[in-house]
């Protein structure tokens, strides 16, 4: 994902050039495809949200249900992202700095949540913590809830975002090698001092990049969260679930208003992503 | 290399701690829950499992999911190759903007994409209006599902083809031209084989993602059993009706499919890394 060919200077040799008319035809076709497939849906979100005017838009955003959905979404991200940073860092450290049997299996397993359908991710938590699940009766006895409660939403979100940070860090740390760290140790630094002073500064842009992607997914996850949440208004609705509920109640303007918040988040993510990509590239070289 | 790394293992600290944290989190969050699903469906027995997976409604959902995901991935390959080519090879106003929005489907929450696409392609929508005028039902049909899945999968193809095109040696094309190939021949016989592995990888990733996709599809599909009901939706419906055994069996079948895809994608990436390394 990190490579998007940012070289702005381009020197094509004569043998690599197409005639000008073909060049512009292809450019037009590509721009049309991107506009149709990607840009129009984005514009639709804002157009539909503002269709009934600013007042309706703002009123939809300050509804108590929308606000509590926003709070829950922020809470989920506030827990998911730090967990991912710690685990991602640990995973990248052991995978790139040591050799041990089963290492490539471990890397594959870290990527596993990417391949699993979000709905299946939610399903497995229902099977464990649901009323008829493994721990269901025990949880009921102790009056604890995981499914249809924020805890389940957070667990499912951590599952879905599990690979994000590790995935960005592993290639960067692999490429950088451990010379700088070994030098720090040789000069007498303790393990933690080496980590804070050498390892972390060297990977910080890649780490931010992973955090940005992880955060976007944590705030926007729908399928997995939808299975475990139970859609209890004001209690277990995240912003994406609030979008669904409003939409199914035919409150389209309100639904798109809430959706526009998430679309703004996506736009901020894209901007942060392209800035960070440039930094990661320059730190690598 | 091996020896040096074994030495490092003693010098660099934190092996036990980092591996411990990783294995604990991986087991608690990912592996244990997944094995719960597998064990639960093992409890059904082979016959029970097979029965749940082959009901007419399940089979119809398999068919809808597989065909729409396949066609979406095919469209992604065509559009993705074109977009990657133009972004790498040409300079035009707005190129950086269009390059950045390729990632929008990764960043936009799927539910948002779902309602936006539905608004766009339903009868009164900007595009739906025209399509319905031509007699094409674009929302609440398999076509609508395919449109949503195309949106979701596009960045996978563009982002796997782009670096290959960017790093391709200009000498390859010059050599072809010097040897008398026309531009078309060069594109077909020299450039296309170079990007094929990346295209296959992108196709597989888009297809795998599309099979499991839920949020962007559920609004536009209309959710008619046997016609426009995708697998993830069928699982949710069965959960809501407390048919846990059915849902578990289907979930496990999907897990099996995703695991196979994960292995294929890993293998493909190794293959085309090796190819790029060899150049």
Image: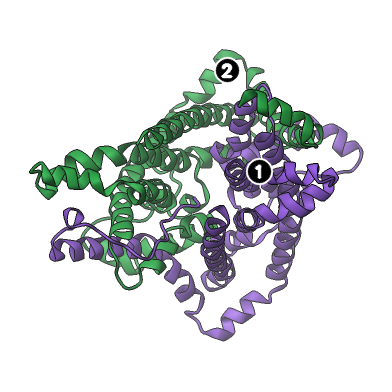
Chain colours: A purple, B green
- Where disc 2 sits, the SS reads helix
Quadrant in the picture for residue B181: top left
Q: Nearer the viewer, residue A264 or A10?
A: A10
Q: Is residue A203 left or right of residue B63?
A: right
x and y percent of residue A28 in the render?
Answer: 24, 65
Which quadrant of the view contains residue A147?
top right
- Kindly indicate the quadrant of the structure image that contains residue A130: top right
Quadrant containing the C terminus of chain B is: top left
- The residue drawn where x is 48% and y is 53% is B216
Residue under the image location 55 percent in, 14 percent down? B47
Q: Is residue A267 above or below residue B239?
A: below
Say which element carries label 1. loop
Which chain is mark 2 on?
B
Q: Split into 4 quadrants, where in the image is the N terminus of chain B? A: top right
Is B45 on the left-hand or right-hand side of A146?
Answer: left
Classify A46 as above or below A99.
below
Residue A162's disc is: 1
Q: Which mark's residue is nearer the viewer, 2 or 1?
A: 1
Horizontal side of residue B131 vs A104, given as left or right: left
On the question of residue A283 being in view, the answer is yes
Q: Position of residue A93 (x, y in %)?
A: 70, 40
Compared with A93, B58 (above or below) is above
Residue under circle 2? Answer: B48
Q: Do dots 2 and 1 share one subunit?
A: no
């Amino acid at each position: 994902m990190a490579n998007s060919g940012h070289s702005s200077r381009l020197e094509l040799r004569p043998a690599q050039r197409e005639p000008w008319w073909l060049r512009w035809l292809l450019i037009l076709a590509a721009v049309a495809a991107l506009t149709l497939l990607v840009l129009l849906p984005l514009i639709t979100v804002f157009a539909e949200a503002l269709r009934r005017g600013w007042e309706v838009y703002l009123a939809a955003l300050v509804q108590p249900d929308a606000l509590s959905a926003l709070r829950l979404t922020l809470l989920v991200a506030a827990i998911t992202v730090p967990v991912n940073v710690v685990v991602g860092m640990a995973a990248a450290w052991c995978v790139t700095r040591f050799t041990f049997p089963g290492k490539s299996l471990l890397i594959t397993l870290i990527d596993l949540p990417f391949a699993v359908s979000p709905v299946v991710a939610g399903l497995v938590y229902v099977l464990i913590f649901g009323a008829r699940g493994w721990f269901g009766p025990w949880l009921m006895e102790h009056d604890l809830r995981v499914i249809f409660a924020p805890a389940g939403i957070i667990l499912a979100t951590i599952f879905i975002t599990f690979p994000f940070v590790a995935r960005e860090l592993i290639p960067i740390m692999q490429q950088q090698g451990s010379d700088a760290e070994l030098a720090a140790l040789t000069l007498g630094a303790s393990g933690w001092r080496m980590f804070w002073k050498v390892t972390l500064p060297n990977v910080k842009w890649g780490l931010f990049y992973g955090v940005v992607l992880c955060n976007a997914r944590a705030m926007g996850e729908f399928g997995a969260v939808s299975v475990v949440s139970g859609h209890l208004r004001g209690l277990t609705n995240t912003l994406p679930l609030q979008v669904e509920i409003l939409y199914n109640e035919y409150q389209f303007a309100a639904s798109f208003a809430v959706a526009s918040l998430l679309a703004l988040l996506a736009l901020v993510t894209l901007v942060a992503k392209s800035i960070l990509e440039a930094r990661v590239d320059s730190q690598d070289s | 290399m091996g020896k040096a790394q074994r030495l490092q293992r003693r010098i660099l600290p934190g092996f036990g701690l980092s591996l411990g944290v990783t294995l604990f989190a991986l087991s608690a969050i990912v592996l244990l829950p997944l094995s719960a699903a597998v064990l639960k469906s093992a409890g059904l027995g082979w016959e029970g499992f097979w029965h749940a997976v082959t009901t007419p409604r399940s089979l119809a959902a398999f068919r809808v999911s597989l065909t729409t995901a396949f066609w979406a991935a095919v469209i992604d390959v065509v559009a993705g190759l074109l977009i990657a080519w133009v972004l790498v090879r040409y300079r035009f106003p707005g190129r950086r903007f269009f390059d950045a929005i390729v990632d929008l489907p990764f960043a936009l929450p799927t539910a948002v994409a779902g309602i936006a696409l539905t608004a766009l392609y339903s009868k009164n929508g900007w595009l739906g209006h025209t399509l319905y005028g031509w007699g094409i039902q674009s929302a609440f049909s398999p076509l609508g599902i395919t449109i949503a899945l195309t949106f979701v999968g596009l960045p996978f193809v563009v982002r796997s083809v782009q670096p290959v095109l960017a790093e391709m040696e200009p000498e390859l094309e010059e050599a072809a031209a010097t040897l008398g190939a026309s531009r078309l021949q060069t594109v077909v016989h020299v450039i296309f084989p170079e990007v094929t592995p990346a295209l296959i990888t992108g196709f597989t990733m888009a297809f795998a993602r599309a099979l499991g996709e839920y949020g962007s599809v559920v609004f536009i599909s209309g959710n008619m059993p046997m016609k426009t009901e995708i697998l993830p939706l069928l699982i949710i419906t069965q959960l809501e009706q407390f048919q846990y055994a059915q849902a578990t069996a289907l979930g496990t079948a999907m897990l099996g499919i995703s695991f196979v895809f994960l292995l294929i994608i890993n293998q493909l990436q190794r293959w085309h890394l090796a190819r790029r390394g060899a150049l």
